[in-house]
Each structure stands twice: as C-alpha cells, then as structure tokens.
Amino acid sequence: MVEEIKEEVRTEPISFVEEIVRNDLSEGKNGGRMQTRFPPEPNGYLHIGHAKAIAIDFGLAQKYGGVCNLRMDDTNPQKEDTEYVEAIKRDIEWLGFKWGDVLYASDYFQQLWDLAVELIKQGKAYVDEQTSEQIAEQKGTPTQPGVNSPYRDRPVEESLRLFEEMNSGQMEPGKMVLRAKIDMANPNMHFRDPIMYRVLNLPHWRTGHKWNAYPMYDYTHGQCDYWEGVTHSICTLEFVSHRPLYDLFVDWAKQVGGDDQPLDDNRPRQIEFNKLNLTHILLSKRNLLILVKEGVVNGWDDPRMPTICGFRRRGYSPEGILSFIDKIGYTKFDALNQMSLFESAVRDDLNKRAQRVSAVVDPVKLIITNFPEDKVEVYTAQNNPENEADGTHEIEFSRELWIEREDFMEDAPAKFFRLGPGKEVRLKNSYIIRCPQENCCKKDADGNITEIYAELIPETKTGEANANMKIKGKTIHWVSCRHCIEAEVRNYDRLWMVENPRDEIAKYSDEHGGVKGIEAMRPFLNPDSLEVKKAYVEKWLTTRKPLDYLQFQRIGYYNVDPDSTPEHLIFNRTVGLRDNWKK
C-alpha cells in the first residue's frame, strides 16, 4: 500500500483529510494500516449530515484497503434503543458501504471503569460532590481561570470508595461525579477537570443493571479508538477544542495499559472537517424527534424529513446523495449549502436511472372526435432514453384521454403553445391534434372545463407521411382513460419556510420568553409541505416495485412509496425536472 501511494499519480483533487491519510500511509505510520470508525449514538435515525461522515469514514477505508468499524456510542441509556441500531445499519448499507465489525462503547465499560480506578490511584481523578451548577460556575470563563473544587485533593482511598458507591444503585443521580484532575487554569476549558462519570441509575439495553454510573463521551471516545486500533478518528469541527483532551486520555490509557495493552504502538489521529449544513433544513435528532412526537410529520421516514430513510422514501438515490457530498467537499470552514445544489445532484443522477412514464396529476378529459370509439392503438415507449438496456413497455391509445388541465386554455394568449381554440399540439408518441375554433370544450354548472374536443391530423404519427409536419404547439403527454390506473400522488415541498430554521427558532424563542419545542418551531413550518392528489397513470406502473425511480414526463421525478400496492398505487414526488427553489 505504501509503495502504491508513493508511485500513484494524482488525477483528481482530494480533500485535506485524504491528504493526511495518504501522507501517513506513505510514511508507514501505524504499521501502514488504515482503520476508521463511524460512531453514531443510537438515540434517533441518521440524518443527511451523518451521510457526509459515513462517506469519508467508510470511503477512505475502502479506498486505501483499510477497514471501518461501526461503533455505537451507547453511553446514554435513557435515550437509546435497538430500533435505532437497526435503522443505522440499514441506512449505511443503503448508501453502499460495509463495516468491519459492529462494536459498542458498552463493550468497553469494564475497561473504562478499570482505567478510571487506576487514574484515581495515580491522583489523576477524584470524586466531586458539587452540584452541576457549582461545577459550571467554578470552571471560570475562557478569559478567567477556574477555581479548584473543594474535593479536588480528597484522599485517594475516599475517592475510590465513593466511586464504587456511585455505581451501587443507591446513590442519587447528580449527587456525585468523577472528574479528571488536569488544570483549572488551562485556557482550553475542556482541560478544567472534565467530568468522566455521572450517576444515572438506569438499566442499559445491552448490559442490564450491571452499571449505574456511566462514562462521559470525552472520556470514552479516545480510549475506544485506541483499544480498537483506529488510525484516523475523523469528526466534525466542534471537536477541534476537544482534541487535546482526546490525546491526553489516550496517553493515560497507554500509560496505564503498559506493554500488555493491545496495539500499544497505535496512536489514533483526530481530524476535523466541516459539517453538512443545508438551507431550509433542521439537522438535529432532538428537534427531529419533536416533529415526530408532535405529529408534524408521519414518522422518521416521512419524505419531508432530512433523515437518510426520509430521503430514501422520497426517492433520492444513494448515488445522488454521495455525488452531492463529493461536490461540496470537506473543508475546515462551516458553510450553508443551498438545497437547490443538493437537488441538482440528485436530479442529474435520477436522469440516468429513472424510468420514463406518463402520468396526469391534474386531469381533464380530451376526446379525439375523429378516432373510432372501439379502436385501440398500442405504442412502444422507451423506458429510459439514457439507457437502452432498460428496455421498453407498451402504452395504449384510444378515443378518450386524460391530459393535464394546464395544457388547455380557452382564452389562450398568442404565446401559449399548448391546446386552445384553433391550436395544434403533438400527443407524445402519437398524433398531432387540433382543437376546433368553436365549441372546443364543455363546462359544468360552475364553469369548470370537464371535456376538451380535438381532431387528429391523419398520418402524423412517427413513420407516417405527415410525421414531420411543423406546428407551433408543444408536445404534451396523456394516458388513455380506458387503460390507465387511478393513483395517489404525494407532492412534497419544503418543510420549513425560512432558509435557516435553527437561527429563526432561536430568535423567536428569545423574543417570546424562552418558549421551546414545537411552539418555537410552529411559526416557521410550511402548512403546504404536502399535497395529496388523485392522478391517472399508465397501467404498466402496477409492475413497479417500492422505491423504484420514475420520471413522470414533463412533471418531475417520483418514486413508488413502500405502502404502494397494485390495488392502490402511491407515488412520492422526489424533485421537479427543473430548479424551483428560486420561486
């Protein structure tokens, strides 16, 4: 691997993270090994921000012949569940990645506890009885040093005894914590005697009632990386200030472990990159859970949710998502990316893979008056002009058709190039038709158009004598009334009406007495984020499977909803054919 990297000629730009990995491998660090990990907390479903971490954690390991383990950060039992563990696995597999081992922070609870005991014995940790408010106050500020806890120099034997009591199940949560003894004057606030353990007195979904005191993330993460043999610990920018503490805890684990510690020559290297931020999206599992519990959306996989399973159900392809992540790249500067850029990447990918079909989502009947009532013509439609291997299917043509209501205008302006009195259009894959100048439509008592009348122009089908007849009108799509299927179409729009909902919610909360939760969110939610319509579609669509990618011609990209059945077809709008965010 090392020699390959030295000789390789770079043909494409690479991220600064990959540059670090390449250099480390070229220099033979960690024995020339490459190992990463993806460490989600199983307290919710993964969102699109996690996809960026997944792409680099798994992608670099795969590219450089290494391994990426999936490690659940399950140190907070009150919020975690096996449901989330299984959902995380599904999402990673759907994105196209495979992990080495499935591991859990709870696998290391005993090691972490034993290490903490040794650190107490070495005078590097102590039990503190202050309240959380007192601890926060005596930590100082970034410009003012902290004040030592009155328990900082308590005897080692006393801290050991109290530490055992913390895990007894008899101690009240919040009464005591274990803190690392580092430096209360350090300019890095994370070094001011950080908390290592707290009392929860809750059973763990994997370890049962064995533990009542649980380790904190900062204490847990580095040691787990070290014990597992992680070479590159890749995380987001908020952990930059945590890195010195990460390194210190790894040093302590190495010193305590001595020569018997596995992978003693390994030092995980923490590298930080910018988060994925998108306009009109709120990325926070806590806030997403509120939307689910309050019934604003229909579960974690609602197509309006920014969860990976939500995008999957909406019809986004994993290739489109990864293409977008590749386009925005990895940097050391946070940025707010436009949702239109994301949709553009997905649209480009769907154009290659979506099956083309006819569907009419706002139907009005068109009657071809000079076509026999009992006659049916069968045409061959190409499934995907971008890929001939996708084959063809048949579509029927008859006297009565459904067309889009917007494709007809009774009082049409000169630049309206669809149907109207005296106007001509081509029916896709079929004839050119012409509306009569007079009596071209029928209306109901309320003045709504119920039927449109037109005549076909003979021999204007493809391959016939007048096939190349020039007209001003456009080509419009249709489905045969006798041969189509009624379907439910769900047109999804943005869930949030503001570009940056996180900031707007925080501002609203400040201006309204600290209101929280759904009450702070409600003013910014889009009441029209879901439109459900009755549509007519080709009967061939009864053969499509859930999550199949489709293009409703002239309308947009859709997919088959998992709840769809041949008896009740349901389609979700993924994105339009063109960018509609500027509107």
Image: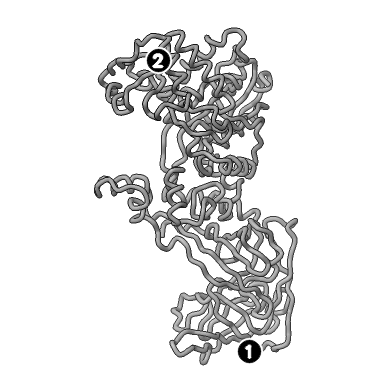
**Residue 276 appears left or right of 562:** left
Res. 38 in view: no
User: x, y (%) of residue 50?
Assistant: 52, 39
Q: Is residue 145 above or below residue 278?
A: above
User: x, y (%) of residue 104?
Assistant: 58, 30
Instruction: Report the Cα–Cα distance between label 1 and label 2.
Output: 91 Å
User: x, y (%) of residue 524?
Assistant: 35, 55
Q: Find residue 125 and report its image quarter.
A: top left
The chosen color scheme is one colour
Q: Nearer the viewer, mark 1 or mark 2?
A: 2
Q: Residues within 10 Å of mark 2 (few under 14, many from 20)?
A: many
Amino acid on which the number 1 mark rests in the picture: Thr
Residue holding disc 1: 369
Residue holding disc 2: 126
Q: Earlier in the sequence, mark 1 or mark 2?
A: 2
**Residue 359 appears left or right of 522:** right
User: x, y (%) of residue 395?
Assistant: 71, 72
Q: Nearer the viewer, residue 281 or 471?
A: 281
